[in-house]
């Protein structure tokens, strides 16, 4: 039975012995299916850049703080609001992603874990926290 695929080996001597690195079979299965179907690996794109978890925590944010949602991207089309500076240079926090399809998002790891299970073209319910309160937007994911 397949448990993984070797990708690299670290060998101080240059021989085929040392520490090996492999992709887990669960990761490989999804990639192989995409390679067969599309000839390339496609990943769903939400279309945001976000603050590191540590920075968001320092600001008292529970979730993923949106720094940017580039125009024309999935998040921007759905109405996600990025972080900005006001005319006095003060930080005006953007939306905070708190859930996807009802699954709680506490940080970047949660966001990536959920996105890895989704497909490009899929429409999701994006739970957000805004100054005005909680909001839910429909977002159709793009492909990488």
Image (spheres, helix red, strand yellow):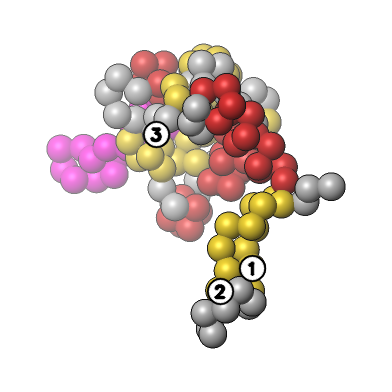
Q: For the residues marked 2 and 1, what is the alpha-carbon distance in whole angstroms? A: 6 Å
Instruction: Give residue 48's mark.
Output: 3
Q: Please give the name of the residue rendered at 62% of the width and 63% of the height, measured from the top-left corner.
A: 21
State whether residue 133 appears in this view.
Answer: no
Q: Considering the image in quadrants, where does the C terminus appear?
A: top left
> Which tag is nearer the camera, tag 2 or tag 3?
2
Q: Secondary structure at mark 1?
A: strand
- In the displayed structure, 111 sits above or below 10; it is above
Q: Are marks 2 and 1 in contact (CB under 8 Å)?
A: yes
Pinpoint residue 93: horizontal percent, then vertical percent: 36, 39
> Which tag is nearer the camera, tag 3 or tag 1?
1
Q: Which residues are magenta?
A: 80-95
- In the displayed structure, 11 sits above or below 100; it is below
User: Badge 3, how many Cα within 10 Å: few under 14, some, many 20+?
Assistant: some
Task: Judge left or right: residue 22 versus residue 67.
Answer: right
Label 1 belongs to which residue?
Answer: 20
Label 2 belongs to which residue?
Answer: 10
Q: Secondary structure at mark 3?
A: loop
- In the displayed structure, 112 sits above or below 136; it is below
Nearer to the camera, 124 or 118 = 118
Pinpoint residue 10: horizontal percent, then vertical percent: 56, 74
Nearer to the camera, 22 or 15 = 15
Dot placed on the residue nearer the N-terminal end, 2 or 3: 2
Q: Please give the name of the residue rendered at 27% of the width and 23% of the height, measured from the top-left corner.
A: 71
State whether residue 68 appears in this view.
Answer: yes
Q: Secondary structure at mark 2?
A: strand
65 part of magenta stretch: no
Task: Judge left or right: residue 120 versus residue 94.
Answer: right
Pinpoint residue 89: horizontal percent, then vertical percent: 18, 45
Q: Main secondary structure of the magenta part?
A: loop
Q: For the residues marked 3 and 1, what is the alpha-carbon distance in whole angstroms? A: 34 Å
Dot placed on the residue nearer the N-terminal end, 2 or 1: 2
């Amino acid at each position: 039975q397949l448990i993984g695929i070797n990708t690299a080996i670290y060998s101080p001597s240059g021989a085929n012995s040392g520490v090996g690195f492999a992709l887990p079979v669960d990761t490989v299965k999804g990639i192989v299916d995409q390679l067969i179907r599309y000839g390339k690996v496609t990943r769903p794109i939400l279309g945001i850049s976000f603050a590191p978890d540590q920075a968001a925590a320092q600001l008292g944010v529970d979730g993923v703080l949106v720094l940017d949602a580039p125009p024309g991207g999935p998040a921007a089309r759905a109405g996600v609001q990025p972080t900005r500076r006001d005319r006095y240079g003060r930080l005006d926090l953007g939306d905070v992603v708190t859930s996807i399809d009802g699954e709680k998002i506490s940080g970047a790891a949660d966001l990536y874990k959920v996105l890895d299970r989704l497909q490009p073209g899929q429409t999701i319910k994006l739970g957000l926290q805004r100054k005005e309160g909680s909001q839910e937007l429909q977002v159709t994911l793009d492909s990488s």
